[in-house]
Image: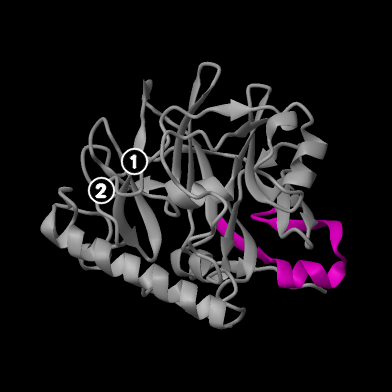
Amino acid sequence: MVSICFNRILILVSLLSFVWIGKVYGAPYNGFDVTGSLIPVEKIMQGGPPRDGIPAIDSPVFVSIDSANHLAADSLLLGLEVNGVSKAYPLSILNWHEVVNDRFNETAVVVTFCPLCGTGVAYRAENKGRDLSFGVSGLLYNSDVLLYDRQTESLWSQLKNQSVTGPMKGQRLEMLPALLTTWDAWKKIHPDTLVLSTDTGYRRDYSRDPYFGYDNSPRLFFPVEFLSRAYHPKERVLGLEYKGQFKAYPFAELSKMGEQGVLKDNVAGEWLTVEYDASRRSGRVYDSKGSEIAVVNAFWFAWFTFNPETDVYTSP
């Protein structure tokens, strides 16, 4: 408990110092034009670091399984397979950078992670035939990271999957199926996977978690619009949007049916298949034709505040 409190104090001190910097440079919205924003501008908050104070990785370096010495068996990562290429993005690195601009052969992909919401989401980084690259704005909405594209400086909400300001306002990106899981589980499924290296071009202690203790604490650093006490705020859920319907699968419910399993569930009139591993808080969802559906593995508070009308799966 002392360690958790001490780390929280360190994080808060860092946030306060970055807030001061943000007030000096580009206040109150870090230099972004929020005119006509699709979200209430009064709810756009300084997250701490200024624009690009959390640096995106633009030239990612990858290593093979045999050279991935920076990962332990239970290390968490975001795994992605595109165009037959598998890559693993350790959360120990994403915690410090939040955005990786990458390519899978000819396909531009952006991998995003918000430590405050526990959300790792990957997108095809293309809009109307133009590849986009992204950075971290230093701004938050409902405690979730606001990205920005460097081509137009439009702000994008990760969990709304939508540009909310600027020339791209209203546009969306294609979300790609990504798996939040452990290193031992991912490499078993993808023995030829590449792994994001700690050779990022930045000096960071990737062995240290700057958010240590946050995942288990009921406290939030920033206010959110809607809050439900149905589950612990940091309870992990698989959240999906399918044919206009939103549904959450809390691992607290899934674990009642066993540590690992498969279930069928009817969403928007179609039977979906949910494969889950409750011990790793990991899972995938497939449609009736067997195609994988992109889902968001998120903290309960984050999924609910963006989708307050969500349906919630409860174990029988």
Q: Quadrant of the C terminus?
A: bottom right
Which residue is at the front of the view, 289 or 238? 238
Residue furthest out toward the top: 106
Q: Using the image, determine if residue 234 lies above or below residue 61.
A: below
Q: Quadrant of the N terminus?
A: bottom right
Amino acid found under the numbered disc labelled 1: Gly
Q: Report whether residue 178 is seen.
A: no
> Residue sitting at 68 percent across and 35 percent down?
68
Determine whether, in the image, residue 197 is placed left or right of residue 37.
Answer: right
Which image quarter: residue 56? top left
Which residue is at the front of the view, 202 or 288? 202
Q: How is the image coloured?
A: one colour
Which residue is at the front of the view, 237 or 57? 57
Residue 266 percent across, percent down from the top left: 73, 57
Residue denoted by label 2: 51
Q: Report whether residue 130 is seen.
A: yes
Determine whether, in the image, residue 282 is placed left or right of residue 255.
Answer: left
> Residue sitting at 42 percent across and 53 percent down?
160
Q: Secondary structure at mark 2?
A: loop
Of the numbered discs in the image, which one, if any, rests on residue 135?
1
